[in-house]
Image (spheres, rainbow, N blue to C red):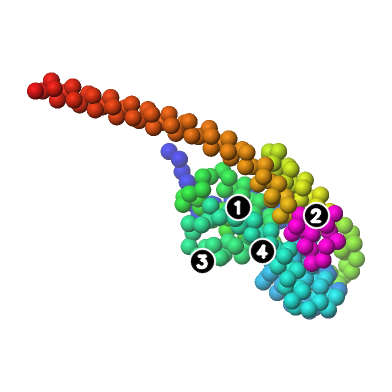
């Protein structure tokens, strides 16, 4: 008899699966807090940004734009463009959460980050996209990452002044390593590798574009390559499924004809 995990067990499992991502995000949060202490913002501004925005890359970009006295419209537009990748994350996870009430989807969407997406996607791929998929694993991952980010932001805010050169120590490589750990396990097919190589190469050459538009363009190009390479495979799968469906219908028709013949024979015998 198969026992299904309880909600609390799912929640704890989601948090546990996120621990490696939390370790990678910790130095990133400390560096963010340290940068706030060296800028014009108050400490509570930095903590409130982590509480409300909860997006590491967008927070770093916003901090730099604030330091350069950029307008609100520029800050908003730039962070919006950088975070557009979450639309792709949402589209990927939609088949597994679309059945949930709006309040569930709003909470999960607010907790969605790169790391949480990697954990949730790995979990959902082991289950068919149906109404039976539990959202508690997703929630546990998101809450764990959210609390982790708040803690390490606070550490950077409280102790950043004592280590003014912290951001120059190369600790930000921990986030690079985390993203490598997110991407590499997904490269299980040629189309995935082609999409990743395309996006990575173009992001490197287009990094000088204003407002991080090069990053968005590289992502869109990578998606286009992945979709283009997926179309022939889908066509082959569809062609393979068609004969199978035809054979099933033929077998069903044969069974129906046999049953009809048997019925008539029985009726004739009774007469």
Q: Is residue 246 left or right of residue 219?
A: left
Please tell me which residue is depicted at 90% across the width and 66% down the height of the picture: 165
Residue 147 is labelled as 4
Above-or-below relation of 39 to 179: below
Residue 14, magenta (yes or no): no
Please tell me which residue is depicted at 26% across the width and 27% down the height of the picture: 259
Q: According to the image, label 2 marks what residue?
A: 203
Q: According to the image, label 3 marks what residue?
A: 103
Q: Read off the magenta span.
A: 205-218
Please tell me which residue is depicted at 72% across the width and 73% down the height of the picture: 76
Mark earlier in primary sequence (2, 4): 4
Q: Nearer the viewer, residue 243 or 85?
A: 243
Q: Secondary structure at mark 3?
A: helix
Q: Secondary structure at mark 2?
A: helix
Which quarter of the rendered picture does the N terminus lie within? top left
What's the distance in space between the residues labelled 4 and 3, CA to CA? Answer: 20 Å
Please tell me which residue is depicted at 77% across the width and 76% down the height of the picture: 43
Q: Nearer the viewer, residue 166 or 173?
A: 173
């Amino acid at each position: 008899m198969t026992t299904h995990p309880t909600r609390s067990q799912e929640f704890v499992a989601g948090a546990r699966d996120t621990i490696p991502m939390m370790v990678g995000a910790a130095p990133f949060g400390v560096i963010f807090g340290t940068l706030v202490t060296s800028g014009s913002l108050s400490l509570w501004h930095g903590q409130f940004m982590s509480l409300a925005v909860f997006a590491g890359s967008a927070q770093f970009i916003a901090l730099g734009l604030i330091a350069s006295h950029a307008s609100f419209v520029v800050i908003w537009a730039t962070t919006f463009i950088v975070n557009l990748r979450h639309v792709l994350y949402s589209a990927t996870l939609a088949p597994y959460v679309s059945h949930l009430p709006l309040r569930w989807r709003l909470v999960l969407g607010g907790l969605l980050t790169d790391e949480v997406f990697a954990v949730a996607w790995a979990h959902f791929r082991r289950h068919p996209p149906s109404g039976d998929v539990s959202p508690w694993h997703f929630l546990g991952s998101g809450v764990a990452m959210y609390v982790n980010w708040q803690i390490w932001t606070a550490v950077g805010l409280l102790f950043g002044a004592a280590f003014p050169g912290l951001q120059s120590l190369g600790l930000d490589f921990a986030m690079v390593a985390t993203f490598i750990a997110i991407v590499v396990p997904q490269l299980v097919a040629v189309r995935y590798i082609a999409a990743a190589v395309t996006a990575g190469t173009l992001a490197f050459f287009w990094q000088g574009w204003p407002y991080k538009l090069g990053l968005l363009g590289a992502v869109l190009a990578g998606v286009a390559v992945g979709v283009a390479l997926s179309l022939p495979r889908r066509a082959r799968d569809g062609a393979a499924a068609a004969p199978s469906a035809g054979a099933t219908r033929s077998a069903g028709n044969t069974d129906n004809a046999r049953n009809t013949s048997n019925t008539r024979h029985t009726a004739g015998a009774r007469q």
